Amino acid sequence: MKKVYSRQALLRLKPAYLAVLLTLAATPQQLMAEESAEATANADMLPVVQVAEDRSGEPSSEETGSYTIGTTTSATRLDTSIKETPQSVSVITRAQMDDFRLNSINDVLDFATGIKVERVEPDRSYYTARGSDITNFQIDGIGTPFAYGLVFGDIDTAAYDRIEVLRGANGLLTGTGNPSATINFIRKRPTADFQLEVDTSVGSWGYRRVDLDVSGPINEAGNVRGRLVLANQNRGSYLDNYSSERNVAYGIIEADITDQTSVAFGHTYQQNDASGTMWGSLPLLYADGTKRHYKRSDSTAADWTYWDTINNITFAELTHEFDNAWKIKTQLTRKEISSDSRLLYIFGNENRATGAGLFAWPGEYHDQTEELIADAYLTGPFTLGGREHELVFGTSWSRSDTDETENSADYGVMALANFDAAANVPKPNFVSSGSFAKLRNKRSNSYLATKLNVTDALKLTMGANLLSYELEGESYGAPQNADAHDKVTPYMGAVYHLNEQYSLYSSYTGIYNPQFNLDANLQPLAPIEGKNYEAGIKGEFFDKQLNASFALFNNIQENVAEQIGTIGITAIHRGIEADTKGYEFDVSGEITSNLKINGGYTRLMSVKDEDDNNVKSYIPRQMLHLSAVYKVPYIDKLKVGASVNWQDDIHVDIGTVRYKQDSYALVNMMADYEIDQHWSTALNVYNLTDEKYLASMMWGSYGQSYYGAPRNAMATVTWKY
């Protein structure tokens, strides 16, 4: 078993982060002893500790323990309540992540309204919302769209206070206007008071996880604070041959230079090592077109396969508040993602009688992506017409370099005797095939937005984004060159307060979305262009402890990528027109002090192309999720909860065969008992009814998928100081 920090991993960390680790590594008993001794010696000389308020403008959900939040900046960078945001917003808070042990972004997004997690492989996932792929992942509101809309490995959530989901286009802040959703990871921040938490979990298939989270002031005055989060996770799997290890380290130091100026420096390190991982998945049909049936544990992975990824994210930020309530914030972020894999792809269709018809294609890959992002914005109030309004102006610049190399098996492709032979394919000798992708992508976007308080009841938000980008390089030997300059994406939103509880809203966002999907000539498709409309009603209830909303949406796009085949293993596409209509309900927060809920329902009424044909049939047209946690009144230290995720039937066409996945529901249960002020224990059960279902049908047109996890459980013991 690997340690959380290897010697090499420690050397990667900057001295400042090592200082956080060493400073905060002291045990609570040591700190208490030091404080007690100092208090005895200097009882009359202790200074008053003054800690500056949080300048992020966003509340910490871990402090409130709520299932909702008061304000968000995900839509416009202006601190706005969910009720006054003219788009649909959902949030998964730290309390909900802890209650249901949502330790990865895939688990979190299963609890988010309208989001479908497409687990196409154990170590590769896509995400969809409102009929479109999600390509915008941000951290504290900063990030650039990822090229192919997929995530390698699985992003751990230990470092984050909450995950905000802004559904619909976010062209104002990103310049792309993707009409699906933007996933915004809000980092944990240092706390004014010392706190320490250790979680130890064990579960099915040899699951083991340990989390450490320590935070507090570093100096006596309290104007320098730090936080360190460490996690180590090892697990086997219900899938044959598969196992994985994950190591996470997040460190941050915040310092108040003056009463109005603060700086922060931080780093996140995540390592995912997966063994026996599938590349592609299980062939769904026999050669005669009849459906295959598998055990849930079946896998195509040989024991020599692996997929290892390392993510490093370093950031520095400066915030200054002026005397007139204006604020400027700048951030510099560097990301580095590396991936090494040795994989085995099984394709074809087996003959029922002879077993022939399947083929093995091994490959060895190294991917490296480096990204640099600079971001700055200025925001504050101004007076016009006797009323106070808000204004924000910002700009960001990014450069991303990607280098991907491939080694091929010396025998190329091997014919298999039958499906059972896949797991026993011998490890080949690999020979270099050279670089198959080397790309540089540069982007810049500037935006201006204002929120006008036209009357006490009517609020208007207007703005625009100016985007320029440039792509250069090659992929599979074909030049990849594309650029655009000064592309304007408009944004308009209106909110009308009917009373203190309810508000009506509507919004319009232009869509301009550069894409990296390749056409039949292995060239990037032209950018997606279109319009995003949304309207609805929002409400705040129970003293603003519960947020609820209903939204109608319509996305109209041109040149949306639709896959038409492959060249080798490279997917090729054509551009189509797409029109998506639907509606959503969303609710989150507290009904009583004992009952917290989070739920939502999405109905896609149509996802059609220019010929009025239904497209993307692998996306459910209806999805429902609901989770609730209840503190038992007569056993006040006990809370119990449940969640359910339901989707209706989906299908794909594999040649002339229509393959259908029936509707299904996944039910999870939890119970948590607080033994005393320091100790608590919890039990979580997932897929309680042991539902058998396909993890995704996004790649069903390739004729492949695999089964999701059967019933499993996790037990956790927590110690807090």
Image (cartoon, rainbow, N blue to C red):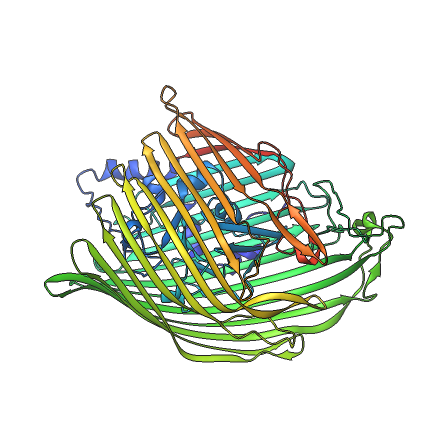
Residue at image position (20%, 43%) is 46
Residue drawn where x is 43% and y is 43% of the image: 600
The number of callouts visible is 0
Decide if residue 176 is on the left or right side of residue 403.
Answer: left
Q: Percent x, y for residue 431?
A: 77, 69
Q: Is residue 642 above or below residue 104?
A: above
Tell me which corner region of the image, top left, top right, bottom left or bottom right, holds residue 636. top left
> Which residue is drawn at the image coordinates 10% and 63% (left, top)?
386
Residue 192 appears in the picture as rendered: no
Residue 257 visible to an observer of this rendering: yes
Camera-side residue of 117 and 655:
655
Image quarter of residue 436: bottom right
Is 449 left, or right, of 516 in this rendering? Answer: left
Residue sitting at the far right:
354
**Residue found at x 82% / y 55%:** 426
Q: Quadrant of the N terminus?
A: top right
The residue furthest left is: 386
Quadrant (top left, top right, bottom left, bottom right) of the C terminus: top left
Residue lying at the far front in this picture: please name it. 612
Residue 2, image x and y in percent?
61, 47
Residue toward you, 279 or 75: 75
Is 674 or 52 nearer to us in this picture?
674
On the image, the x and y values in percent for residue 625 come to: 47, 41
Which one is in front, 343 or 560? 560
Q: Measured from the top left, where is residue 96 in percent x and y? A: 42, 40
In-image side of 212 versus 235 (left or right): left
